[in-house]
Amino acid sequence: MSLQKTVLLSLIFPKISKTYYHFKCVIHTKLYTIPFDILLNPMKYLYYPLIFLVLISCNEDQVSTVSVGFYNVENLFDTKDDPKTNDNQFTPSGDKKWDKVKYAEKLQNLAKVISQLADNKYPTFLGVCEVENKKVLQDLANQPALKQANYGVAHIESPDERGIDVALLYNKSIFKINEVIAYQPDLSSYNDKTRDILYVKGELANGEILNFMINHWPSRGGGRKESEPKRIAAANALLSIQKEVQAKDPNAKIIVMGDFNDEPSNQSISKTLNVACDIENIENNQLFNAFCNLEKQDYGSYRYRSYWDMLDQIMVSKSLITDTVGIHFTPNSADIKSESWMIQTGKYKGFPLRTYGGNKYLAGYSDHFPVYISLQGN
């Protein structure tokens, strides 16, 4: 049974104390910082005319669960031509006749999915890929359906020739960013560049540090086997980041997510990254892939012809499984968000309902389904 606390909370007050109490409870997704003296002596300040006191019942269960999602949002471009990238298709004069009306509908559609992504709620953290710039992320975060999510944006422009990037949306009420770094996988031997791996380090309201690594590895264009060396190069880059973080803190809590364009059983993930699929048998410094079992059951986040591929995945460090005192992974929480209204009918029945089919506007969501996991605390 959850512990209930009732407090008198001052929402408007003069600066009357240098000592403040950081209220570690989420109330409608907001954290409150209030003068500690008011908590000890609430009656002392009742005569202040600007003080507005409200009675709030705070349930600690509201911060006991954290959800983490990932979504390839498929070509979230604004309508402006960026001369530095190949984004001509997604302009009003381009092949797809991409205009403000379609852009607004795309944002609204994505917000609908995200607002229900994790057990019918918006996720606390959401990694995304195929976003053009920080502006489209801010436009997405400002959608009415996502206002209560209180999303901040962690993003760095990548050198991808199409101009698409990865990013992290996070609930600003319970997470403070400490560091954001972009790492570019070395594809120089292929005379190519790809999306950066985005590293985000920050602190939860309870003081715990989380390390996120958001990925969008090279595509399977040209064939899966032919393009595989590029994804192995991306895996090596990710492994280097992971080792760097764990060298500084062997117990670092790490969450890796992305569209890997490979499945858990493919070489880049199973061998290069050397991830574990058995939650009961994880070596030190090894990642656990929460989506191995879904691949084995022939589920997937992306459909190619008649086959489902488990390309979008979330992995966690061993410390997020063994440390049950702090925030930790919830076993069997990995899932794919797919609702009937997110799925095509007709000729391509069963496929994700995307924004375009070729140059035909379908007014859908994405060609990928989003995925998510849950973390829990004590």
Image: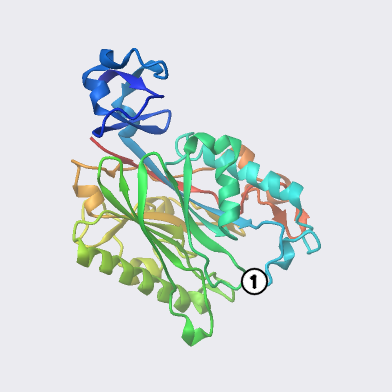
Q: Nearer the viewer, residue 227 or 37?
A: 37
Q: Can you give x and y, in whole percent of width and height, for residue 228 in the image?
A: 47, 75
Residue at the spot 31% in from the left edge and 44% down from the top edge? 204
Q: Where does the C terminus fall, quadrant-wise? A: top left
275 displayed left or right of 104: left
- Image location of residue 26, percent across then percent down: 36, 31
Q: Is 103 left or right of 13, judged from the image as shown?
A: right
The disc labelled 1 sits on which kind of residue? Thr
**Looking at the rendering, in which quadrant would you find the N terminus?**
top left
Q: Dividing the picture into quarters, in which one does residue 284 lie? A: bottom left
Which residue bears the numbered disc 1? 85
Foreground residue among 198 and 372 = 198
Q: Is 147 situated above or below 168?
A: above
Name above or below for residue 319 compared with residue 243.
above
Name the residue: 59% across, 38% down: 112
Q: Residue at x 62, y 69 (%)?
A: 162
Q: Residue furthest right?
A: 93
Residue 304 horizontal/vertical position (percent):
59, 60
Q: Decide: few, some or many residues near mark 1? Use Cα within 10 Å; few <14, some 14-19, many ≥20.
A: some
* Of the pair 202 and 327, the residue shown nearer to us: 202
Label 1 SS: loop
Q: Is residue 113 above or below residue 5?
A: below
